[in-house]
Amino acid sequence: MKKLVVRKRFIVAAVFALIVAALIYLDGKRTPRSFPDVSGGTLIVPVRVHLLRSRELPAANCELTPSDATGIIARVNEIWKPARIRLELESVREEKARNPSQITLGRGRISMESVRNLRPHASLQRSMFHVYYVHLLCANGTYLGVDAIFVRDTPALRPVPGGIDTPVPRVTAHEFGHAFGLVLPHHRVVTNLMAGGTAGIALTPTQIQIARQTVSRLPFARQAKDKP
């Protein structure tokens, strides 16, 4: 009886091995997905930064300066440099937050459901990304669309090996990751840029390919020829 059981297990294992080998072979025969080549040049996307101000709503009153914003975008570009994706700062606007009375708060922080209402309509433009900095948000940041990326000016991140000690650029780069088609990785991958709540900035080759594919499809993106 024992010999029969062992023989059955051997047969099952052999069949399983053959199936796996066949799948690997077939996978190798498939036509690979087409992604833009990273060596094809830097992809450039314009971005307008909005520093919201509000006396009526302290949570919306961003404490960053235009000089801070310029430095943040420069640091974000360093993070995305391995993917050859660059944000082109179109302008920095210091603006009065819109509809402060219509904003709902949770423990003094702006809720995700209402934060979009803070955007001044006059400065919205379709042909670029829009990043809004506020003081206190229920999360470090959120991506709600090309025209609605929100980041708080006081984010809290957990240090990790290889991470950075500048939270605002990291959160901004993370939210652009969502804009570029990336999702949160496994919770154990804490050093990745898309990890939630950490200072990680690493990008995998697959993430880089996906991001470049997504950016290349944006109607306002352009490709620059890198210098040799």
Image: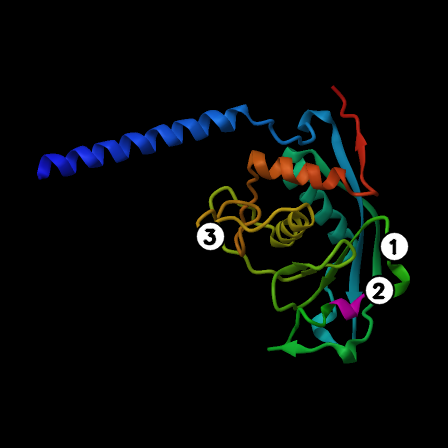
- First along the sequence among labels 2 and 1: 2
Give the residue pinned by disc 1.
125
Q: Nearer the viewer, residue 80 or 13?
A: 13
Q: Mark 2 vs mark 3: give the one in front.
A: 3
Q: Residues in magenta?
A: 116-120
**Residue 178 in view, yes or no:** yes
Residue 166 is one of the magenta-drawn residues: no
- First along the sequence among labels 3 and 1: 1
Give the residue pinned by disc 2.
95
Q: Is residue 195 above or below residue 25?
A: below
Q: CA distance from mark 2 to mark 3?
A: 37 Å
- Badge 2: how crowded within 10 Å, few (<14), some, or many (20+)? some
| Residue 11 found in image quarter | top left
Give the residue pinned by disc 3.
187
Under circle 2, the secondary element is strand
Q: Nearer the viewer, residue 37 or 132?
A: 37
The x, y position of residue 127, in whole percent, is 86, 48
The x, y position of residue 61, in whole percent, is 74, 69
Q: Residue at the bottom extreme?
A: 101
Q: Amino acid at mark 1?
A: Gln
The x, y position of residue 44, in whole percent, is 78, 38
Q: Amino acid at mark 3?
A: His
- First along the sequence among labels 2 and 3: 2
Q: CA distance from mark 2 to mark 1?
A: 15 Å
